Image (tube, rainbow, N blue to C red):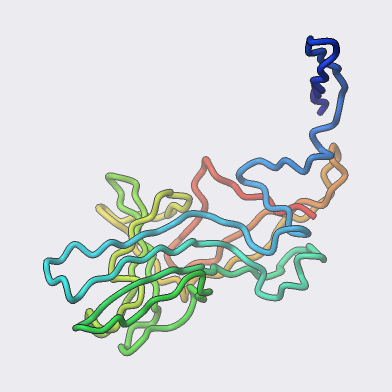
Amino acid sequence: MLALKLLFIPIGGSIVALSGVSSFSSLDWDLPNTWRASSKSNFPLFTCKHIDTRTEKSQWIESELLVTLKFKNDGDRHNLKDDVQLELQGIGSVISSWGTQIKHNFKSREENLHEGGVGTGDESRYVLTIFTTSNKTRLSELGGGHDSYVYGDEIDCNKTLFAFSRPDTTQTEQHLKNVKFFLSNCANNKTSGRLECQIKIESNKGLEWRQEFKPIVIS
């Protein structure tokens, strides 16, 4: 696709516009559902936040967790092919206080969102919930009580990019430890000449991409 470029040059008190043509493809502009893996190590999906509203001023959490996809083996992003595994990664920032001391205070810490539970018998530390009526997404952090949370027990997200093939009546939960992501249907695009792959999801609860959002990974 071609785009018009204008160069404005002052000449004798007037401004003259010189036009030219350039290709959009040369600018590496990608659609929101496109992940150019060769130049971007992760693919941002949505952001989840928790602001504690409890009245105990000595106990509170303010957190933000950016949820992204990354290659399980970073070297694979330069060699796209079917069945290469991806994983959900959180990039988190937190400040919290329990009692009279600051408990957590960090920025941009990486989290593996597929890890097991912390301090309990739960099979997953993070649980993704989609509410059927409001179509909103929430990320829950499981633990053995308020003092075991890092990001908060309920972290509300700004986008809903997932759905369930078998949704429950009011809300459906997915323990993220039981979800896997893989590249699939990798093939050369006849128009761009680039290798393109889809992302498939394996889940014990029927987690899938929303119909309106089908991510594509390109070389």
Quadrant containing the N terminus is top right
Q: Position of residue 28 (x, y in %)?
A: 77, 43
Q: Is residue 107 above or below residue 14?
A: below
Q: Position of residue 87 (x, y in %)?
A: 58, 70
Residue positioned 83% across, 26% down in the render: 2
Quadrant containing the C terminus is bottom right
Residue positioned 71% across, 68% down in the render: 83
Compared across the picture, whether 167 is left or right of 107 comes to: left
Residue at the left extreme of this rendering: 55
Compared across the picture, whether 97 is left or right of 25 comes to: left
Looking at this view, is 188 or 97 the one in front? 97
Compared across the picture, whether 186 is left or right of 132 comes to: right
Query: Which picture quadrant has residue 157?
Result: bottom left
Q: Is residue 178 above or below residue 81?
A: below
Looking at this view, is 100 or 169 the one in front? 100
Residue at the front extreme of this rendering: 12
